[in-house]
Amino acid sequence: MAEIPNRTLQRGLEMLEILSAHPQGMALCDLTHTMNLPRSTAYNLLQTLVCLGYAVPSADGGKYVMSSRVFEIGSAGMQDRDAMPFLREGMRQIQSELNETVHLGVRSGSETLYIDKLDSTRAIRMSSRVGTRMPLYCTALGKALLSGMTDDQIRRLYGQEKLKAYTPHTITDVETLLSQMETIRQDGYAVEREENEPNVCCVAVPLHNAAGEAVYAMSVSAPAFRMQEEELRRCVELLGEIRDRIEPYLKTL
């Protein structure tokens, strides 16, 4: 591996990556321990990120979180790609017809990164934000993205580890997840009922490129009581229509 010319820049970027993996925030002492740095060095790096607007104190003042500025930079790069207007227009159509929350996500390691969102206008709706990261294995977006990977790739991603349970409905072993993948690949969509968050149901479709990789996933999220069989079928139908319209374009990129 080539020598990194600027270690300070490297450490600053590492700190941003650590903050991005902890959306609930991290205290200076935790950052110091995680990065194995002297407290003064970690403090200077953190204050630089704060001064430049890439990190901000959390609401309780005891921790620091990554600011929306980081996502805005990444999002600007994404929106320069020709696919983004098509994806956004598809999301608008779904949100307008269903009046439920629509998400767009991409895979980031073992997590889903939510890169776009259109909110429902209903009083009871999904609470989420752009820039959030969630585990792949317990969200509909994540499962749709995983379906573009082979079983061997998924096994390598998770190894032998037991998957963390977020609710009593969360799948916690890889073999059960792989069994679900077979169904998702066959059906063309993923459904998640209260696996990541109680009382929330989501349905998602993968969006493939020419190589067959699931480069995006699009989902509809709603309170579980509003996602009965008839509503679920309507979501699947609309998401499938949008997928069929967008995928041919993605395959030209």
Image (cartoon, rainbow, N blue to C red):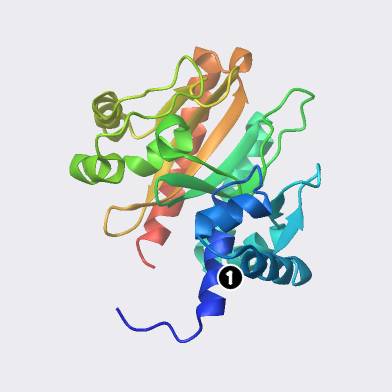
Q: Nearer the viewer, residue 96 or 134?
A: 134
Q: Quick check: 189 above or below 19? A: above
In the rendered image, residue 218, in percent from the top left (x then y), is placed at: 50, 42
Quarter of the image containing the C terminus? bottom left
Q: Nearer the viewer, residue 83 or 223?
A: 223
In the rendered image, residue 100, in percent from the top left (x then y), is placed at: 65, 31
Residue 219 visible here: yes
Q: Quick check: 225 above or below 105? A: above
Indicate left or right for 93 with 185 as reference. Answer: right
Quarter of the image containing the N terminus? bottom left
As drawn, the residue found furthest toward the left would be 152
In the rendered image, residue 78, in percent from the top left (x then y), is placed at: 55, 65
Q: Residue at x 50, y 24 (%)?
A: 166
For label 1, the residue is 12
Q: Quick check: 252 above or below 124? A: below
The amino acid type, in three-letter code, at marker 1 is Gly
In the rendered image, residue 37, in percent from the top left (x then y), is placed at: 55, 64
Q: Nearer the viewer, residue 93 or 152?
A: 152
Q: Nearer the viewer, residue 192 or 43?
A: 43
Residue 240 visible here: no
Q: Residues within 10 Å of mark 1 (few under 14, many from 20)?
A: some
Q: Residue at x 54, y 46 (%)?
A: 104
- Say which quarter of the image contains residue 9: bottom right
